[in-house]
Image (cartoon, rainbow, N blue to C red):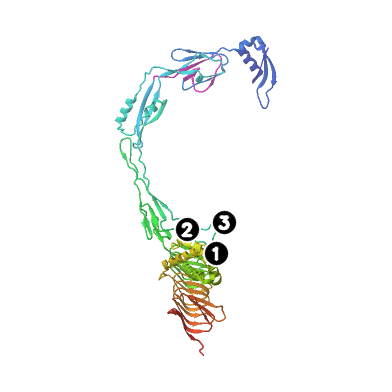
Amino acid sequence: MREEIVQGHSLEEIRQDWAFKLKLSPNDITLEVIEKPGFFSRQWKVRLIWDDQSGSNLVLPSSQAVWDGSKYIIVLGEGVKQFRPFLLAGEVWFNGKHQDKPFQVSFGERVEFLPNVSVGQLTWDLQILHQGLSVVAKVRHELPGRYILREDLPTREEIDLAQYVTWENLPSQGEIWDEDKLKLDLEQLKVVHGFRPESWSEIMSVKGVGEVIIAEATLPVPSQHARLEDLVGSPQMLSDTGEETVDYFASKVQLLEEGAVLARKIPGKPGVPGKDVLGKILPAAGFKDFQFRLKKNVKLSVDGLEVVAACGGQPVRLDERTYMVENVYILHKDVDLATGSINFPGDVFVNGNVQDGFHIFAGGKLEIKGSVSHAEIRAEKGVKIYQNLVGGKVIIGGKFVVRSKLLRSVSDLRDQLSICLQMTAELIKSPGAVNFKPGQCLKLVMERQFPDLPKLASSVERFVLENKDDELITQGFIVSIRTAKHFLAGLGPLDIQAFPFLQRVDQALEQFIEKVAVEVPEKLSFVVNYVQSAVIECGGSFECPKGVYNSNIRVEGDIVIEGVCRGGKIFAGGQVRIGELGGSGVSSTFVQISADSRLSVKYCHPNVIIVVGKEIIQIEEAYRQLEIFREKGFVQVEKMRVNPL
């Protein structure tokens, strides 16, 4: 016995259908109900049981296809329930009606299939599009042949025609154009440019209807306009975050050095004309160039593509293509947290005050309309402060200050060393030093007469190394200073080579002093209304109309203080004129002038120390019209007592 589990809408339908399929009598089939129709399924599920000897009847007869010369007649075999047309292959007719969708069939029914037959065709229609930019062929390409259907179709519930038809090529009987025809058509359209060699193979690849581009215009290459690359930008702003790392006292002025690039022109390229398929020239867009407009302190590079700073200063962009460098920085406000400090390579003018903790470094002149409080001021070409200077440090002409200090310290070292060596040479020749070596004699003279000479040599060495970038300080000079320190400090004087080497150092220092001459610029000056508790170093002259109190001032040129100078120290390389010097009830006031300078004081209080060269003059009582100068090698003091006896 054989069994099969099947489903159906009713028991009778299941019995009749399977009896037909198995070629059995309905009474020979036994049904056992497995599942009745319910909520989830409306079909019966049963077990079919029939005699095993009838199993051979499961091989159903197949459908047959017969060609009558114009169409196929398909006789449907047993078990076929649905027929699916294939519209590309041809038309399907059933019961006199054209079928284009799957339809139901049954055993023994006939279906007619009229296969498509093509006689072959290769034609086209050429069109010039987009005003001559391209030629397009609308191609119709059909291969000669027909669809054939296999005679014996398998036994299945559905016959899908697409699975059983094949294409059979036949000799061409239609209109077939060739490549020469294509070229002739192009000539008739007067197409002379842009033919695509691969277009013919693309035409042959078309199946049915399609479009092929036959020729294309050569489009113009667009121009590349010259571009401006601006390098000035905007000044850097303070960050809203990370305030702990922000230097609020730093300079916020945007600066650049000489030779820096402010802007750059990226050269453009002119366009290349094109040509349409008819040979007409397609012009390229116009090429746009521009020229920089230069104002003061800028120039063009050799190739004319860059704007270069002719001096250091603040870059300024006046408009899109106009640049300049301002070597004068003008600030119409106070120097405070809002502005930051100022570092500028040119002249600086501040129409305000300079607050505590800030600095102004100017490569040129500096003018401050207001006051300066506990700030650092540096200017290479002069400073003028219209109001007061309280605390802080001021350096004018730093290069001259360094060189003057260098010359003074080296001269002092050479003077002491020369005398020390002279006394040592005399001691060596004396009868009482026969048993002494030269180094011992040198050590003895230094300990008794020049105890500060080792410290002076160390100080000069330190200063020279700190300023070794100055062009006056050569490598040979550094070696001489280091040699002096080596043989003057510690046990150096006892070295057997100390005395001859120090003699050579003495000669080298003498040559250096003769060669170096520090000329104070005439226009280098520091003018301030009032000074208190400040440190001032000026390579030029100093002028104060009101007064100077408790300040340390070193000036290489002349000093003029119209008012009071009280407390502190003054070192002058030129002439000194003071209205009132010193004061009662305060610490002593110290004034030192060079050997060839002159000190003039209208009124001098007691407790004033004046040094001329190496001579010290102690003023113990008040004088009027005090004049101190050197004449014929002697210091002269001219004075008038305030209270004559």
Q: Earlier in the sequence, mark 2 or mark 3?
A: 2
**Residue lying furthest top in this view?**
53
Query: Can residue 336 be seen from the camera position used here?
Result: no
Q: Amino acid at mark 3?
A: Gly
Residue 153 placement (x, y as % from top left): 52, 15
Q: Amino acid at mark 2?
A: Pro
Q: Where does the magenta region start and end?
A: 90-119
Q: Circle 1 sits in a helix, a strand or a loop, which is it?
A: helix
- Locate the N terminus and report the quarter of the image it occupies: top right
Q: Of residues 84 and 119, which is closer to you in this image?
A: 119
Q: Residue under circle 3?
A: 242
Q: Nearer the viewer, mark 1 or mark 3?
A: 1
Q: Is residue 192 above or below residue 399?
A: above
- Mark 1 packing: few (<14 Cα in 10 Å), some, or many (20+)? some
Q: Residue at x 50, y 84 (%)?
A: 623
Q: Is residue 272 above or below residue 248?
A: above
Residue 104 placement (x, y as % from top left): 55, 19
Q: Circle 2 sits in a helix, a strand or a loop, which is it?
A: loop
Q: Amino acid at mark 1?
A: Leu
Q: Residue under circle 1?
A: 494
Residue 556 placement (x, y as % from top left): 45, 71
Tag 2 and tag 1, C-beta contact below 8 Å: no
Q: Is residue 213 left or right of residue 423?
A: left
Q: CA distance from mark 1 to mark 3?
A: 59 Å
Query: Can residue 386 be seen from the camera position used here?
Result: yes
Q: Which mark is residue 563?
A: none
Q: CA distance from mark 2 to mark 3?
A: 19 Å
Q: Residue under circle 2?
A: 235
Q: Of residues 388 and 506, which is closer to you in this image?
A: 506
Q: Circle 3 sits in a helix, a strand or a loop, which is it?
A: loop
Q: Of residues 137 and 496, which is closer to you in this image?
A: 496
